[in-house]
């Protein structure tokens, strides 16, 4: 989307003054205000239809951004409670700052904290297509001819000439899975393995580790505890072997309940951000190609059965449609679909911190996954408003109030995402 730093025509002057006045008085528009202010737009007029799509997009993004921020708050408060810290904070900024200080104190004392989250969310292509239908993408724009190579998708119910994507949850998959594949037996897993591991690992094994262990041991540590010889319990970093729940790195395998990164063969389920071979149930997106002919999903090619008009999931090279297209892509991001999160927690040297983070990491990871898909569209919608809003002559009197409240909501979404980005770093989470 093109960046514009000023608004066009008379509308720009009036609108800028309105924003400054609202800022000075501490007022801001809510999602409900925006929906009300934009309800009277005439969507048969292209400029007003584009503004309508913009307003609906920023409202959807703001709602999802608020939900994510609240999830970070709740997850941080829950971890703080387990750690004996203040768990009464009402904002994500305050709750996660307390957690961050606790983690930093541990790290400063020599503890290592590693949290990895598998990013396997998928954008709702159907939501994008529906938005573009109402936003009136230029009828002279041939989507199929002007879409970025490899980014054209058609909703198919027939035979597909290329790859077919079928969304979960839990679809039978004989192809590649972007998400979590369960029912796997002894496969290489370039992601998070949950079940058992036949060789060296980094993660948590309920049965312990019998060789070259380094990490947190919730049982009997034999070797060294924080550098001192020991055979017993260890509240710090255990090096040697661990009988009991072991979290860290280990040169042996785990044939009990395991979750983490497996350097050998994984049995149970595998979750990864990149597509990998799957023969089982896929939570996410299952992709298969010919000779399997039937496709009841998204076809990246030609569909010979019943199909809806194609959607471009990449760049669309039609100037008259660019603003609407970018707005609708952002709206699809607000409706991102995420399978159950897969996260790995390894804390070496602080069993209490390990237990607290591990107990609530799924809630933290669920917020983190969505944040990864929201942050760029939210920033774009907050910064790049000129073309979507248009000039006063284009959107009419009814559009002025809609535009003003929409921009206010876009700013709120951007502020919420900024808080969540900082909250996501409170336990040094990284996307896998």
Image (cartoon, rainbow, N blue to C red):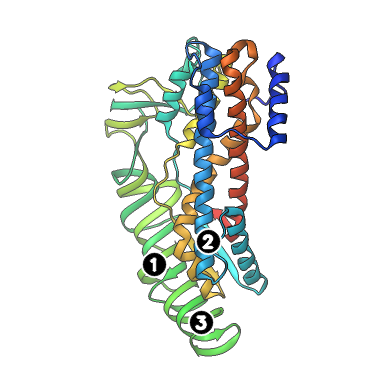
Is 313 positioned to the left or the right of 163 in the image?
right
Residue 396 at x, y = what percent?
Answer: 59, 12
Residue shown at the point (60%, 31%) measured from the top left: 381
- N-terminal-most mark, 1 or 3: 3
Classify 256 as above or below 324: below
Secondary element at image label 3: strand
Give neighbour class at mark 1: few <14, some 14-19, many 20+ (Cα, 10 Å). many
Q: Quadrant of the N terminus?
A: top right
**Residue at numbered disc 2:** 77
Marks 1, 2: nearer the viewer: 2
**Residue at numbered disc 3:** 240
Q: Is residue 159 visible?
A: no
Residue 268 at x, y = what percent?
Answer: 33, 60
Q: Quadrant of the rendered structure where residue 8 is?
A: top right
Residue 397 at x, y = what percent?
Answer: 60, 14
Viewer-proximal residue, 81 or 224? 81
Marks 1, 3: nearer the viewer: 1
Residue shown at the point (46%, 51%) measured from the top left: 366
Q: Is residue 100 visible?
A: yes
Farthest front residue? 25
Give neighbour class at mark 3: few <14, some 14-19, many 20+ (Cα, 10 Å). many
**Residue at numbered disc 1:** 258
């Amino acid at each position: 989307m093109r960046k514009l730093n000023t608004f066009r025509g008379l509308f720009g002057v009036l609108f800028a003054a309105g924003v400054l006045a609202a800022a000075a008085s501490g007022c801001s528009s809510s999602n409900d205000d925006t929906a009300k202010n934009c309800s009277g737009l005439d969507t048969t007029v292209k400029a007003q239809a584009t503004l309508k799509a913009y307003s609906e997009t920023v409202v959807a993004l703001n709602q999802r951004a608020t939900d994510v921020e609240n999830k970070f708050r709740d997850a941080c408060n829950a971890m703080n409670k387990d750690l004996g810290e203040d768990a009464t904070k009402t904002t994500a900024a305050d709750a996660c700052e307390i957690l961050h200080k606790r983690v930093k104190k541990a790290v400063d004392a020599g503890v290592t904290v590693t949290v990895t989250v598998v990013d396997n969310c998928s954008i709702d292509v159907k939501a994008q297509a529906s938005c573009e239908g109402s936003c009136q993408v230029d009828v002279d724009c041939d989507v199929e001819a002007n879409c970025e190579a490899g980014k054209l998708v058609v909703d198919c119910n027939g035979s597909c000439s290329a790859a077919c994507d079928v969304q979960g949850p839990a679809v039978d998959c004989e192809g590649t899975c972007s998400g979590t594949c369960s029912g796997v037996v002894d496969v290489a897993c370039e992601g998070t393995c949950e079940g058992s591991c036949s060789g060296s690992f980094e993660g948590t094994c309920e049965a312990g580790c019998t060789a070259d262990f380094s990490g947190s041991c919730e049982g009997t540590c034999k070797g060294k505890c924080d550098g001192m010889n020991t055979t017993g319990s260890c509240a710090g970093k255990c090096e040697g072997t661990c009988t009991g729940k072991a979290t860290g790195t280990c040169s042996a395998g785990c044939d009990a309940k395991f979750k983490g990164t497996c350097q050998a063969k994984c049995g149970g389920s595998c979750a990864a951000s990149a597509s990998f071979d799957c023969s089982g149930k896929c939570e996410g997106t299952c992709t298969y190609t010919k000779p399997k002919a039937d496709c009841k999903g998204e076809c990246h090619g030609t569909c010979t059965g019943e199909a809806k008009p194609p959607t471009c999931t990449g760049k669309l090279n039609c100037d008259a449609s660019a603003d609407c297209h970018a707005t609708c892509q952002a709206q699809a991001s607000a409706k991102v679909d995420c399978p159950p999160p897969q996260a790995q927690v390894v804390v070496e040297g602080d069993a209490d911190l390990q237990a607290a983070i591990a107990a609530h990491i799924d809630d933290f990871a669920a917020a983190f996954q969505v944040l990864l898909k929201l942050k760029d569209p939210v920033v774009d919608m907050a910064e790049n408003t000129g073309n979507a809003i248009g000039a006063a002559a284009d959107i009419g009197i009814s559009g002025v109030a809609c535009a003003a409240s929409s921009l206010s909501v876009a700013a709120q979404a951007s502020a919420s995402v900024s808080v969540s980005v900082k909250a996501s770093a409170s336990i040094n989470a990284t996307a896998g």
